[in-house]
Image (cartoon, rainbow, N blue to C red):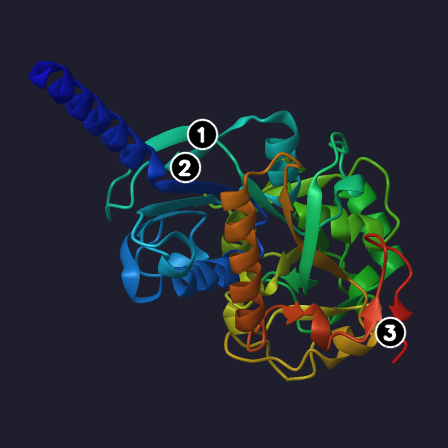
């Protein structure tokens, strides 16, 4: 009898230990690059003083990192359980594809600073800067929560003359179709005979969807990348990441135009190289800032090149994942109230139903 009781007690202990081991929470996030700074701050806010450790691609500037892994406690959601959150901002379209196809995503395996080991895991949640219907991955339908608006800017290289201050919808369509055009097409100066080149994001980017939909461009774009060895542009068959575009615009001594969101545009020549689209820029201050920007043209509809920010989950998401998503949405909304690069939906006085769709005023 004593042996039997001991066996039961030991077995119960094993069950409890196993339950305890499984109780720790893990959430893996992929998707939109444009929102990585706000996401980083919002996740930190969820942990608060109980964040244990953070491992980021760029330790000196973790908010700009593509991959980040956190561990710690989110006590208001999960009590004393250890919560691991992994992020890989691999692109808005890629994030939707991750969920729809249940494909593996490469994450930093641990939150130990400096640990470069990666682990392939499925994404649980994805940030998006486009509607699911704007991608090739429309089924099965994901659960979509919109939480903000982010403008996309055209940005010129440091080697582009001061006379290039704007690009129109029609100019972009011709530039994308050809990959390079005479500079005078943009300056109106007859002697500007040099070429201006187009640098583009890769197809996984929501920003590319937004720009092409906004200009009603549906062809096969031609684009280039800067070769730092030859100091010239060469044809590019795949497209660049946002950080690569940022770096190429800073390095290129010849004229070029690409597109970026604020978190990267502010780091091209100190935010001075953002140009207008169809006339206005997205902000009223003289130079785009990393601290605060007057986004009135976006808020009231004078600037239309923007997309909603979304969080997607599968319809089969667990109760824990839904609780985490809802808490993350709340933390993001708080952060957006003072964000330099994006706006909470509550501040915007216009609405649209699709990328490139008609922008309508919100009726009070």
Number of other residues with Cα within 10 Å of mark 2, as a class: few under 14, some 14 to 19, many 20 or more: many
- Which of pointers 2 and 1 lies earlier in the amino acid sequence? 2
Q: Determine whether label 3 and label 2 are within 8 Å by CB.
A: no
Identify the mark at residue 151; answer none if there is no mark: none
Residue 24 image offset from top left, x and y in percent: 34, 41
Of badges 2 and 1, the one in the foreground is 1
The residue under label 1 is 121
Q: Residues within 10 Å of mark 1 (few under 14, many from 20)?
A: some
Image position of 238 with respect to 179: above or below: above
Pointer 3: residues within 10 angstroms few (<14), some, or many (20+)?
A: few
Q: Can the viewer see residue 188 in this picture?
A: no
Q: Residue at x 47, y 40 (%)?
A: 28
Q: Position of residue 286 (x, y in %)?
A: 63, 84
List x then y, in percent, for residue 206. Answer: 68, 47
Q: In terms of secondary structure, where does tag 3 sit?
A: loop
Picture coordinates of residue 283, whole percent (x, y): 69, 78
- Secondary element at image label 2: strand
Residue depicted at x 64% and y 62%: 156
How far is disc 1 from disc 3 in space, using C-alphas? Answer: 41 Å
Q: In the image shown, does 11 or 53 lie closer to the viewer?
A: 11
Determine the CA span between mark 2 and mark 1: 7 Å
In this rendering, which labeled residue sits more in front, label 3 or label 2? Answer: 3
Tell me if I can see residue 222 in this picture: yes
Which residue reaches farthest left? 2
Query: Is tag 3's residue or tag 2's residue first in the polypeptide sequence?
Result: 2
* The N terminus: image quadrant: top left
Instruction: Determine whether 161 is above or below 300 in the image.
Output: above
In this view, the residue in front, 131 or 78, is 78
Q: Are marks 2 and 1 in contact (CB under 8 Å)?
A: yes
Residue topped by disc 2: 107
Give the label on residue 362, or none: 3
């Amino acid at each position: 009898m004593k042996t039997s009781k001991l066996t039961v007690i030991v077995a119960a202990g094993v069950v409890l230990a196993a339950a305890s081991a499984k109780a720790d929470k893990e959430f893996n996030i992929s998707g939109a690059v444009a929102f990585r700074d706000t996401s980083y701050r919002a996740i930190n806010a969820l942990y608060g003083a109980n964040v244990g450790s953070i491992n980021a691609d760029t330790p000196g500037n973790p908010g700009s990192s593509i991959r980040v892994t956190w561990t710690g406690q989110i006590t208001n959601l999960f009590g004393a359980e250890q919560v691991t959150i992994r992020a890989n901002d691999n692109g808005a379209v890629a994030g939707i594809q991750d969920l729809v196809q249940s494909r593996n995503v490469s994450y930093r395996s641990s939150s130990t600073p400096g640990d470069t080991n990666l682990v392939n895991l499925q994404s649980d949640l994805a940030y998006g800067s486009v509607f699911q219907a704007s991608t090739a991955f429309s089924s099965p339908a994901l659960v979509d929560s919109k939480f903000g608006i982010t403008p996309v800017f055209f940005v010129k290289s440091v080697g582009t003359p001061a006379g290039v201050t704007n690009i129109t919808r029609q100019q972009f369509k011709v530039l994308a179709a050809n990959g390079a055009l005479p500079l005078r097409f943009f300056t109106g100066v007859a002697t500007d005979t040099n070429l201006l080149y187009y640098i583009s994001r890769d197809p996984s980017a929501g920003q590319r969807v937004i720009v092409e939909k906004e200009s009603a461009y549906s062809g096969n774009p031609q684009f280039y990348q800067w070769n730092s060895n030859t100091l010239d542009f060469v044809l590019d068959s795949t497209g660049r990441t946002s950080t690569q575009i940022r770096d190429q615009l800073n390095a290129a001594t010849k004229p070029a135009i690409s597109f970026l969101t604020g978190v990267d545009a502010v780091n091209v020549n100190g935010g001075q190289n953002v140009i207008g689209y169809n006339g206005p820029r997205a902000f009223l201050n003289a130079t785009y800032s990393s601290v605060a920007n007057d986004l009135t043209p976006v808020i009231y509809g004078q600037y239309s090149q923007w997309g909603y920010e979304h969080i997607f989950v599968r319809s089969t998401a667990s109760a824990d994942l839904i609780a985490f998503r809802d808490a993350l949405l709340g933390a993001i909304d708080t952060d957006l109230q003072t964000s330099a690069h994006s706006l909470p939906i509550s501040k915007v006085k216009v609405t649209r139903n699709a990328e490139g769709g008609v922008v309508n005023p919100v009726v009070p």
